[in-house]
Image (tube, rainbow, N blue to C red):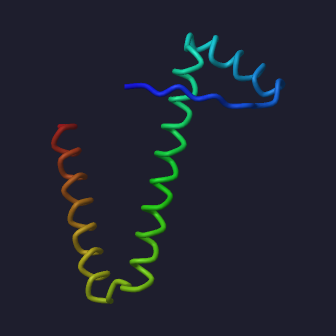
């Protein structure tokens, strides 16, 4: 289902939009819908990043968790290296 809206923008901006949308072979509706979707997605990702950051500020990793992560990372890297060596043989 679609809704019609009316917006006012500067003529100079409209001229730039027209160049971009015609180059991409899009209607105005497609162009604006894609722009708004991209903006909302980016905004949501920024909000999630901020929540993630705040979570780690409130509940930072313990020394034990950091040490365990380092051990697991080293084991993963070793496994990848060994797989690459086997594939090269």
x and y, in percent, of residue 31 in the image:
56, 23
Is 32 or 16 nearer to us in this picture? 32
**In the depicted structure, whether residue 18 falls above or below residue 61:** above
**In the depicted structure, whether residue 56 falls above or below residue 17:** below
x and y, in percent, of residue 2 in the image:
43, 25
Quadrant housing residue 1: top left
Query: In this rendering, would 77 be left or right of 55?
Result: left
Residue at the farthest bottom position: 63
**In the depicted structure, whether residue 20 falls above or below residue 53:** above
Is 62 or 49 nearer to us in this picture? 49
Query: In this rendering, would 37 be left or right of 1?
Result: right
Is 52 or 72 nearer to us in this picture? 52
x and y, in percent, of residue 40 in the image:
50, 45
The residue drawn where x is 48% and y is 67% is 50
Quadrant housing residue 11: top right
Query: In this rendering, would 38 be left or right of 71?
Result: right
The residue drawn where x is 68% and y is 31% is 7
Quadrant housing residue 57: bottom left
The residue drawn where x is 45% and y is 63% is 49
Which part of the image, by quadrant, shows the C terminus?
A: top left
Query: In this rendering, would 85 be left or right of 42?
Result: left
**In the depicted structure, whether residue 40 falls above or below residue 69:** above
x and y, in percent, of residue 16 in the image:
75, 22
């Amino acid at each position: 289902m679609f809704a019609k809206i009316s917006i006012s923008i500067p003529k100079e901006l409209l001229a730039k939009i027209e160049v971009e949308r015609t180059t991409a072979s899009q209607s105005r509706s497609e162009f604006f819908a894609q722009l708004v979707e991209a903006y909302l997605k980016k905004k949501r990702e920024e909000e999630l990043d901020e929540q993630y950051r705040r979570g780690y500020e409130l509940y930072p990793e313990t020394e034990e968790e950091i040490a365990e992560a380092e051990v697991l990372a080293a084991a993963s890297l070793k496994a990848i290296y060994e797989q690459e060596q086997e594939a090269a043989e």
